[in-house]
Amino acid sequence: MRESSLTSLKGATSATPTHLLDERRRAALAEVDNARFSWFHVKVCMVAGVGFFTDAYDIFAINIAAQMLGYVYGKQIPGTPAKLNANQDLGVKVATPVGTLCGQLVFGWLADILGRKRMYGIELIIITVGSFGQAISSGNHAVSIVGVLVVWRFIVSLFGTHPSFATISSEFAATRIRGRMMTAVFASQGWGNFAAVLVSFIVTEAYKHKIIADPDVNHLESVDFMWRLVLGLGCVPGVIALYYRLTIPETPRFTMDIERNILQATDDINGVLSTGHFNHDPDTVVQRVDAPRASRRDFKRYFGQWQNGKALFGAAYSWFALDVSVLPPLKGTLGIYQSLHNVTVGNLIFSAAGLIPGYWVAFIFIDSWGRKPIQLMGFGALTLLFVIMGFGYDQLVATTPGKNAFVFLYCLTNFFQNFGPNTTTFIIPGEIFPTRYRSTGHGIAAASGKLGAIIAQVGFSRLVNIGGTNAFIKHILQILAFFMLTGIFSTLLLPETKQQSLEDLSNEMQLGFVRGPTTHIAIQDGLIVGRRI
């Protein structure tokens, strides 16, 4: 079936009847949707996943690195280790979601113009260079090192975008395994988080003897090495991913529906599904077809329809509500070594107990239960957990058993975020929009999430100490319960996407999608030798 339907496309010319071009496009897409699971699918998950791992490592590493920065460059408070002031700490951390918000919008849009593969490569290069740049940062009289780091972090996060990771995995996946493929890619975020904390733990233990041996003299130099190592090692997976990026073609849906080159897309599909490899032949025939194209007018027309507009709003608000609720990492208040040791060990436990298991339970059920039920269940569970933690906060923290119960509930929130909306808000926007707007739509939804994260980091950091140190925490938890409740209602606006092709989910008629050929270009030795319009 595959050989006959795909090989027949090689004879396509500008004289090919429109209905045959249309049929061939649908036949090629069916090959992708019905493909058997193969090593190529694993490779796609690895390529997209390593990019996500690198991005996640950088995002989570700064939480511990900021504490190390405070010891070296912060203000000394008598009787306690030095730390960054509130504005410095906030600036280092909030630069990431601000940069990511801008990057999601701009580079999500560019991935729909220039291609998923190309933008993914550019993102990896910038993340890799930026991770190394952070590690060798320094300040001077005019610009402090904190200011330099804020700029680097903005640049790194600007290019560390999700849309290309999501669309690469969704557009290569067979329909029956698409949810698991996308979840496997997204689960790399959990491993990136775990790796960042693990590296921080190893670095802390490696410098333990220097910090403890002479805490009045050498510990600042040692801690300065420590945060540079933690951030700088983030460039290693990026270098690895750059190589493997070369082993996959551009997604066939981008080639077919945006570049409008059915012949090239067919060759790519035939190659990767049959042999796992693809070849780019410069001496080939390039045939463009007439099909719907992205434009400002077309964007308004498509999303102006209620069924499409409500899906975009539902995806965007659900991600916003979720990211408002992301709880801050643990912090230490003891001596330098003991504080860093406790922070890294505590976060390793929370990652292993709640974060990573949540991803992989979602992986098991995502293609059987569906995305929408899991998201509804997750938002419902989080609403209940935050209600218990918020309204019972005073009673829980008053006793040792109560504190243990609070820690358990904290782990459960991590679990149900990932076996719930944290995973599904990543997957759904990568499925419900047409190819020409898939990365753009995903970027809009993801940027909405980062807006929620900015509100949480900036707003809650100012609210937390109202009425005394950490006195407002219970009210913050109550506010989070409200946002989780609203997430239930926004989820109701979304369609269920399991076991449906991306084309069916786009709400566009596929019969007649190709309106005819537009050009037929013959290329030899990289030069155009003939063209007919």
Image: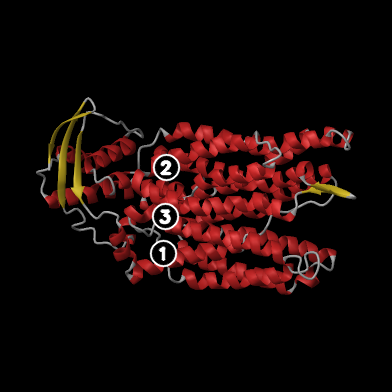
Distance from disc 1 to disc 3, alpha carbons, whole Å, reads 11 Å
Q: Give the class, few, some or many, for how many residues have Cα within 10 Å of label 1's Cα (few <14, many ≥20).
A: many
CA distance separating discs 1 and 2: 23 Å
Q: What residue is disc 3 on?
A: 430
Res. 119 mark: 2
Rate crowding at label 2 as few (under 14), some (14 to 19) or many (20 or more) other CA atoms within 10 Å: many
Residue 79 located left or right of residue 74: right
- Contact check, label 1 and label 2, Cβ < 8 Å: no
Measure the C-alpha gap from mark 3 to mark 2: 16 Å
Check disc 2 and report its element: helix, strand or loop.
Answer: helix
Q: Residue at x 44, y 38 (%)?
A: 121
- Chain-order first, disc 1 or disc 2: 2
Q: Nearer the viewer, residue 461 or 42?
A: 461
Note whether 515 is above or below 1 in the view shown. Answer: below
Position above or below: 461 against 14: below
Q: Specify which label sits upstream in the sequence, 1 or 3.
A: 1
